[in-house]
Image (spheres, rainbow, N blue to C red):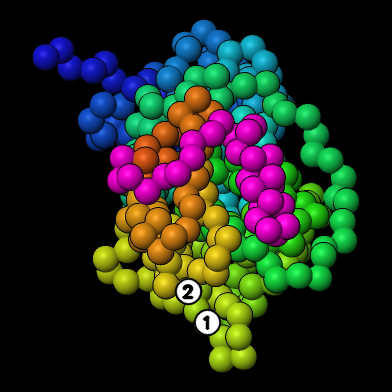
Amino acid sequence: MKPERPITVLIVDDSAATRRALSKLLETAPGLEVIGRAVDGEDGLKKALQLKPDVITLDLEMPKMDGHAFLRLLMARQPTPVIVVSSYGHRSDVFKALQLGAFDFVARPTEEDDASFASVRGELIEKLRAARYMRRDDARTPPPAPKLKVVKPVEPEPARLVLVGASTGGPPAVQKLLEALVGLPVCVVIAQHMPARFTQAFAERLDQSLGFRVSEAKTGDPILPGRVYVAPGGEQVELEERAAGGLSIVVKLSAPTDAHAPSVDRLFSSAAKVAPKGTRAIVLTGMGVDGARGALALKKAGVEVWAEAESTAVVFGMPAAAIKAGAVTRTLPLDELGPALAAALRSSSAS
């Protein structure tokens, strides 16, 4: 059988040390080939159009043309998968980049030496290889600017629980799903694969742009209407029954057997034991199989599990795994998923 050609990579970063460290790191990865290095966004755009790489690693803070301007122009002229390599100090900039078309990110190590970058080698290589399976039309012209936050009154009735699992390509998909649920008496708990410290910035961004109160989950947080909880990076979120009635969040340390932190399987499996009638679970875009086992547990407990369709998923790994496990009741494109879920929740509230 003819071997697959290497995935070609363009590195765009104004730091010579970072360009050197990334090049050295990727040179040792089978199936990847660095075909260019650019010193700023202007140079990066020129080389991207000339070299036509399969995937680009991108710094955001650069002279002449920063990463955000680079993304706007690249997605308009030659849509290409982009992985942002950004420091913890620029967390909010990462989510802007994801809205502009970047499909994932990796947290830049504090030090720019070979040993420090070796700590993110596995994660970066996995995400670069995922570019081969990414829908090319998802690298697209930036969406319109987000609407101003409009807070709608929440009806004083028990919360309908919605559980969401996502990974690669998830942040914009999660926001789009939530936009369709604003004003409904729902509580949403999200397990989005993301490093520690970035989940808080993600929650803050959602809180500023949606008519929900969004926060990073903490032990004891109650399941109430109008609340959205984002599982903290590096930890696990589960649901448990409260002595006074209702449900609450419990944040736990990861176990050695957990492949991800947060884990969709951990959230879904815990909810299968306590989820009230009318609960829905959604599996959005993502790499890998996290969530399939938990989705099956939810189905056995009588909870409907929906999945994002392949036609809109940036990477169809997680939805496909849940579908293959026989856990999914309904599969819809992202544009239809939120409105259909809202309609189902309204119908179940009225019944």
> What is the three-letter code of the residue carrying label 1?
Glu
Check disc 1 and report the residue beneath it: 241
Cβ atoms under marks 2 and 1 closer than 8 Å: yes
Can you give x and y, in whole percent of width and height, for residue 200 in the image?
63, 62
Can you give x and y, in whole percent of width and height, for residue 351 in the image?
68, 58
Specify whether 208 is left or right of 237: right
**Quadrant location of residue 61?**
top right
Can you give x and y, in whole percent of width and height, for residue 217 in the image?
60, 70
**Quadrant location of residue 42?**
top right
Check disc 2 and report the residue beneath it: 274
Q: Which residues are magenta?
A: 324-351
Can you give x and y, in whole percent of width and height, for residue 176 in the image?
67, 41
Residue 58 seen in render: no
In the foreground, 147 or 40: 147
- Label 1: few (<14), some (14–19) or many (≥20) C-alpha neighbours in 10 Å: some
Image position of 3 with respect to 23: above or below: above
Secondary structure of the residue carrying numbered label 2: helix
Image position of 74 with respect to 217: above or below: above
Q: Residue visible at 37% across and 40% down?
A: 323
Q: Residue visible at 55% across and 43% down?
A: 170
Q: Residue visible at 62% across and 21% down?
A: 140
- Asked whether residue 107 is drawn in magenta, I would say no
Mark number for residue 149?
Answer: none
